[in-house]
Image (cartoon, rainbow, N blue to C red):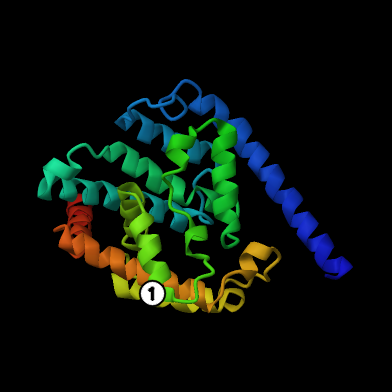
Amino acid sequence: MTVEKLSTTSTDRLATKATINEFVEIGKPILEGTNLVRQDAQLEESDVETVYKLMEAAAPFSSENAELYGHLQLSSTVARRIGEALQHATPSVYGNLNLNELEILTLFDDFGRLITHRWLRNELVGSYALREMGVRDSLISKIPTVRAYIHKDQNEERAARRIFSSMPIEQRIVEMADLCGKRSSDGGIKTFEEVLAYGRESRLHYQETFHIEPLYPSEKRLDVNVVHTAELVYRALHEWFSIERVDLKAIQQEILQEELQHKTT
């Protein structure tokens, strides 16, 4: 590694650390005493509102993060609707799902992107910042992790089956809500296949797509196997929700219809 590369990496680390420290200083007083930091406390609707308050205080809404805010709000709504659909379809199995927790986990899933957009590093930074603010580990541990798709198994299908089987229900819901909560350029919601196609191309051509040169070992671990394995898991999840009688496309259409009605009233 050249001296220039070392200098660039060091500068980025310092800037990221400074931003994390700012987030923590702002966030701790907001989260203090809430159910988000109290072990085993039941999460309520007020806790969802607290997370939005935290986000707005740490990274105020602006033209630069408007797209991310839109995605976070949409995906958290999708997560709640998926939870409701599971409860309705099989109450004996999913009746105890905490819908507020699903929304919060979905918001926390992309929390690191408020700090940095560097692949995987945003996940590490986000979880670290949340822990430093006092968010309980029992909640953070339910957030999906990209690291799950980085594996040494030469058989991608076998690795995908193992990853899918190990995902708790909360992670399955949050992962699918993230995939089904992405806007299209016309204000609609991207289809599952559209999201997979974009993700496949952008991850395989990470540097060209995001104009970011890999600086960290974690970013360099993004290879073809990771991309392919992740897609296999996503497809397994999509099929599983269908088997569980959750109509993901209908949820998207329902949300769009509600948005249209809201605009016309």
Q: How many numbered marks have been drawn onto this rendered protein structure?
A: 1
Coordinates of residue 13 in the picture (x, y in percent)? 73, 52
**Helix or strand or loop: what does disc 1 sit on?**
helix
Residue drawn at 38 percent across, 27 percent down: 40
Q: In front here: 1 or 21?
A: 1
Residue drawn at 23 percent across, 62 percent down: 240
In the picture provided, is 130 more to the left or to the right than 249? right
Number of residues whose C-alpha sits closer than 10 Å to that of mark 1, classed few (under 14), some (14–19) or many (20 or more):
some
For residue 249, what is the image quadrant? bottom left
Report the residue marked by disc 1.
157
- Give the vertical position of 188 relative to 86 (above or below): below
Residue drawn at 31 percent across, 70 percent down: 235
Q: In front here: 168 or 158?
A: 158
Coordinates of residue 180 in the picture (x, y in percent)? 31, 62
Coordinates of residue 32 in the picture (x, y in percent)? 51, 23
In the picture provided, is 221 more to the left or to the right than 225? right
Task: Name the quarter where the N terminus is drawn.
Answer: bottom right
Coordinates of residue 211 in the picture (x, y in percent)? 62, 73
- Give the vertical position of 129 relative to 233 (above or below): above
- Give the vertical position of 115 relative to 48 (above or below): below
Q: From this viewpoint, which residue is outermost toward the right? A: 3
Visible in this render: residue 182?
no
Residue drawn at 43 percent across, 38 percent down: 139
Amino acid carrying mark 1 in the image: Glu
Visible in this render: residue 262?
yes
In the picture provided, is 155 more to the left or to the right than 18? left
Q: From this viewpoint, which residue is outermost toward the top? A: 33
- Give the vertical position of 89 relative to 227 (above or below): above
For residue 212, what is the image quadrant? bottom right
